[in-house]
Amino acid sequence: MSTFHFLFILSIFFSPTLSFRSDELLIDDEEFGLEGGVQAQPLSPDLVNTRSSPPPATATTTTRKKYSDTDSDSKIQFLLEHAFGDSEFSSAGTFTARLKTWNHGGQTLTKLRFSRNAFTDLEKEKFQNLLKGDDFYKIRLPSNVLSPPGREHIISSVKARCLPREGLDEHFVIHMEGGNILAVNYGTPGACSHPRQLKLPAKWSFNSHTVLKNSEQAPRAPIFSEDLLGGETGEGEALQPPERSFWAKYWMYLIPLGLIVMNAITQAMNMAEEPAGGQPLQQGTAVQRGPTAAARRR
Amino acid sequence: MDIRVFLLLLLVLVSSVEHGFSLYEDQVGLMDWHQRYIGKVKHAVFHTQKTGRKRVVVSTEENVVASLDLRHAEIFWRHVLGTNDAVDAVDIALGKYVITLSSEGSILRAWNLPDGQMVWESFLQGSNPSKSLLSVPGSIVQINLKVDKDNVILVFSKGFLHAVSSIDGDVLWDKDFSAESIEVQQIIQPPESYVIYAVGFVGSSQFDVYQINAKSGELLKHKSAAFPDGFYGEVLLVSSDMLVSLDATRSNLVTISFRKEEISFSKTHISYLVGESLGIPVILPSKLSGILAVKFNTLLVFIRVKSEGKLEVVDKIANAAAVSDALSFSEGQQAFALVEHVDGKILLTVKLSHDWNSDFLKESIAMDHQWGLVQKVFINTYIRTDRSHGFRVLIVMEDHSLLLLQQGEIVWSREEGLASIIDVTTSELPVEKKGVSVAKVEQNLFEWLKGHVLKLKGTLMLASPEDIAVIQDMRLKSSEKSKMTRDHNGFRKLLIVLTRAGKLYALHTGDGRVIWSLLLPSLRKSGSCKHPTGLSVYQWQVPHHHAMDENPSVLVAGRCGPHWDAPGVLSFVDTYTGKELNALGLTHSVAQVIPLPFTDSTEQHLHLLIDSDQCAHLYPRTSEAIGIFQREFSNIYWYSVEADNGIIKGHALRSNCIGVVDEYCFNSSDLWSIVFPSESEKIIATATRKLNEVVHTQAKVIADQDVMFKYISKNLLFVATIAPKASGEFGKPTPEESWLVVYLIDTVTGRILHRMTHHGSQGPVHAVLSENWVVYHYFNLRAHRYEMSVIEIYDLSRAENKDVWKLLVGKHNLTSPISLYSRPEVMTKSQSYFFTQSVKALAVTSTAKGITSKQLLIGTIGDQVLALDKRYLDPRRSVNPTQAEKEEGIIPLSDSLPIIPQSYVTHALKVEGLRGIVTLPTKLESTTLVFAHGVDLFLTRIAPSRTYDSLTEDFSYALLLLTIVALIAAIFVTWVLSEKKELQEKWR
């Protein structure tokens, strides 16, 4: 008993550090929670895939010894409701999840499961009307899963024509903050081509993908405060150019040099050609120059 | 080889960018202008002693204390106090200090009258700031400021009476009234005695007088008397021993004589006094010595208070606008000014208090309608050349402008409305008609020639100092920049600004002069519209293609009342003539105005007005507009942010309104909602892209010849939320309990594209969103510094289009339309940097085609505008950029953003009280106009990547011509010479 007390006090003492670690734990937890969901079809690491027909077997509770005993979890469920166009909302399925309470007070959902009610004939008809009218299919969730519906319902909608493929494909991204649902992004898991074609689904069964998302942490501003001098020298090193080729270093000298050499060569060629080439004018000048040069020499 | 050359070029460019926007001393004023204002005047104090005779000290609603030149209206000095430091009273002490009381009577300051230097400052503390006295707004925090002969200033504020020395601001004594449950109404000190009277009400029907020794602050006597009828409102001191108030029923005037042994009341029925019942009386707070002004709707009744509390009606004036306080001039004579509106003119009457029937002065002054009605009058006297007394008055108009009237004329006027701009838009100027400007040039041909010769002299360094001065003057006053026609660079425009007074001004971007102004009739107080407020200005009609002959016009949206569900008003104004074309009083409210990207055949923009019930109303109300609108009916989405509730909702149109027969009204339905948990998040900032922003290309080529595609969507919304605990003052929250969460939301589907938490950070947040990036500024509590972060968002769905072969074969999806209902494949990059200053406004440059690189414009806490290259806020900066990255222009990573002194676009000037920065693209791609407004206005032209597409203005064409001529001459000379030489050679 006394050790428990001691542990409790200790946990209080270290609560700031624990709260600081919370983000890492969240990520761990999400991954951990997904282990259960992924077992059926390991498509993508962040997807929980469920099929509404047949409804998924209830998952056996996995015991977790990794986490401290003060963390408690409880099972909760909340309702998904849908509406066709501007109709009233009616029940469409249930989400079940485990609510994990951390010893620092934070709460997260794990192991989200979704069981979708199959469309009734009336609903099918309504959905077909939506498809014909290119209207919105709306869903809503409570904004707080602990005390639904919370402050207000979270609504999301999609053009009904985006959903049908061979079945009805839907994709939920639920943005969570503790026990609150901030937003749900509902839509097709793939692309929805723009001129939306009227296409009836072959199978009236939902193929649901669900993702839980928590906020990620922003990158911190880089801090070079350890020692500014060190940082500067580091930068200085970085500024030192890597060993460059001879050509890269001296091209500006080499090009004029090359030009001069070329010039010299062509001149030399010309000189070589001169005796051979019988150009009268040139010879004439040579003849003219000859005596003057001779005269000067004299 | 090519790459090396490119690299060299780039290096040159990079080195030049650093100072690309700095300018030389002689360039100041060439392309920028700066105007200084003070705001709507609340109090004005004239000075009578010799040194200050030509100036008036004013305090304004923009929290400005200023000294103005009475002759020319120039500002001698000016101080802009903080936004929470409203001036309560202003006076002059010792003939050399201006005393101001501000922040609800808690700060007393003395300024030196000639130069405005602060002499001293005292903080007057209430005993217990948490007392209920503070939390009750308005009348309880009663402030009295009185300067007496012994250089003692009496201040009553927050339940305390303070006596403050006017020499050094020391509190000599204070008297606590906060325990006495009295609402002190007046502090009176008769000139001949050393007794201060503090009078006030206890409850609503008891009147108390405290007599206090002025030397020591000790209580001499406390008298109390009950008045069973009760009081209404405040008391007015009419003479040194008589107070007047209204009784609780507002049908009787009560005179209170308080200096005798016993307090005596005397009640007079108003309708008995006036003769008929005229409506609800309001006692004007003008101190007229023995006379009382009572206002009934539009009628002003002057009532003289005789001894023993007898009242007598002196005069009734029907169209009176304002009355000044009484001013004593020679030998105890007192005069006051009365302003009336008589058929379009204003009639100024100066009357003596003791002799009503004679008008000391009566002047009728014709006045511009655009100034509206007179709201306040301040009177001042001067000695005329014939040694008689003259009077001049300072009047404050409905549009906030300030005028000085003297000898029946308007000596000067200041358009102080421009100190409180609400919204800004632009309008193009008319196209130049041929044959107009040529004649003007010919007329001044000699001048023109002379100017060019001078310029040439300047460039050839032959000019004398006088010449240089003339050249500089010529450059500044160049008529080119203030012409009333369009220029091919698009520098000349009209800025259409809406001010808080409901006045619309058109300013010329060349020199900042007011082209026209219009006090919008629909935004003036009227029977149906009690508290009209202007909201925003939109471009309504921008003629360019097939409606070239029409004048452009703007739409001004406003509402009748302070609440967002008050009925709206619309006004359409021609931007060339400044005339109101049409005005609509709406039956619905205006919560949001959405300019749609469609125009009708007359180039009128379609606008959707959303009312408080989320119904959409289409304007213009024409069948053609409905036709255009119906085509796009299913593609119109909008969102609304309920910041108080922490809810963001998306809406789409559904059908025509039910119940109302109005084919321009449409219902909406909620498509999505985001509900922020109220215990952990509170919306403090949102930002969207500017509607008129142009993006040149979606692709961004990065270092290793790779391509990234920017996620460019007009429907991106940036939202910042903070912990509710951290929304208070600085220093209160600990880093553990404060955080900042930022979101990028697609407003069509409500998808959260990116969500990120900054732990230990707090507001205020300023953000700007442009292209595919958002930059925001906030405070980091852990690092104790301000930070700026950037998020860039890239589209991955197009990433496979990099292959050139695919492009050639046509297997790409670049031309396929994008649907926001597809699942987005985006990637974000972000990075944070420290920034040393706090920020008042954030904006980004915008150019005509979006090719020029961007600069952030940061309104700093020092009221300047700093330009910071966007490349400093690149999330891909790394400590050791590779050679390839350097070539791309990536700057090595640093922890903080540099503040380069040359990059202040406001150079040495300050835009006091900076509130907003507006950037306007010009036709010249490299250049942006930047308009910063606050109490001051400032406009300049900046080129973020230098003016690569034009020659500078001071480019000397004469020199160029001269050089060419000289070169041609040289060619000929050398040719002739060489010919000659060759000939000689040949002959030899």
Image (cartoon, coloured by chain):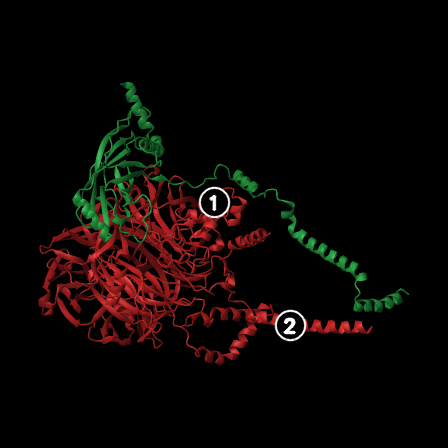
Chain colours: A green, B red
Question: Which residue is located at x 43 percent, y 66 percent?
Answer: B491
The three-letter code of the residue at mark 1 reads Arg
Residue behind mark 2: B968
Question: Which residue is located at x 28 percent, y 22 percent?
Answer: A5
Q: Position of residue B709 (x, y in %)?
A: 42, 49
Numbered disc 1: what chain?
B
**Which class describes the residues within 10 Å of circle 1: few (<14), some (14-19), or many (20+)?**
some
Figure check: A39 above or below B211: above
Element class at badge 1: loop
Horizontal arrangement in the rendering, residue B815 relative to residue B629 (left or right): right
Q: Disc 1 and disc 2: Cα gap in Å?
A: 52 Å
The three-letter code of the residue at mark 2 reads Ile
Numbered disc 2: what chain?
B
Horizontal arrangement in the rendering, residue B898 relative to residue A101 (left or right): right
Residue at the outermost right position: A298
Q: Position of residue B798 (x, y in %)?
A: 40, 48
Q: Quick one: label 1 or label 2, which is nearer the N terminus?
A: 1
Q: Quadrant of residue B450?
A: bottom right
Say whether residue B191 is visible. no
Figure check: A108 above or below A239: above
Residue behind mark 1: B877
